[in-house]
Amino acid sequence: MLSLANVLHQSGYVDDAIMSLNMAIETAPKLVALHFTLANLYASKNDLAKASEFYEATLGLQSTFTPAKERLRAIRCDKILSNPHIFH
């Protein structure tokens, strides 16, 4: 399912790739790669709330997964930089 999702994504069928990964997560909910890839798909759609949710799920399964930490940090930094008024 992960390979299928990657092919679908590369072919421009992001929503289908997301659906494929959601089904895969039902079957293997503790597979870190599924959560991380799903987060990346949501990030590619600029759905940063959902992306954050799945990066956090990735880290919940494997707290040392550096790429998930970095991408989650980037989303949070972007959110802060795009809303500077929260510091005033």
Image (cartoon, rainbow, N blue to C red):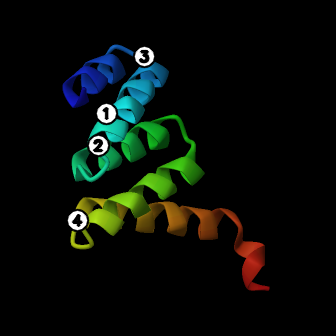
Q: Position of residue 10 (x, y in %)?
A: 30, 20
Left/right placement of residue 57 relative to residue 62 reads right
Q: Which residue is mark 1?
A: 24
Closer to the camera: disc 1 or disc 2? 1
Instruction: First in sequence, mark 4 or 1: give its number.
Output: 1
User: Is 74 situated above or below 44?
Assistant: below
Q: Position of residue 46 (x, y in %)?
A: 55, 41
- Numbered mark located on residue 34 in the image: 2
Residue drawn where x is 48% and y is 40% of the image: 42
Instruction: First in sequence, mark 1 or 3: give its number.
Output: 3
Residue drawn where x is 71% and y is 73% of the image: 84
User: Is 75 situated above or below 16?
Assistant: below
Q: Amino acid at mark 2?
A: Leu
Closer to the camera: disc 4 or disc 1? 1
Residue drawn where x is 26% and y is 43% of the image: 28
Q: Secondary structure at mark 3?
A: loop
Q: Position of residue 65 (x, y in %)?
A: 22, 65
| Alpha carbon separation for disc pair 4 and 3 | 27 Å
| Alpha carbon separation for disc pair 4 and 1 | 20 Å
Q: Amino acid at mark 1?
A: Ala
User: Is 35 situated above or below 44?
Assistant: below
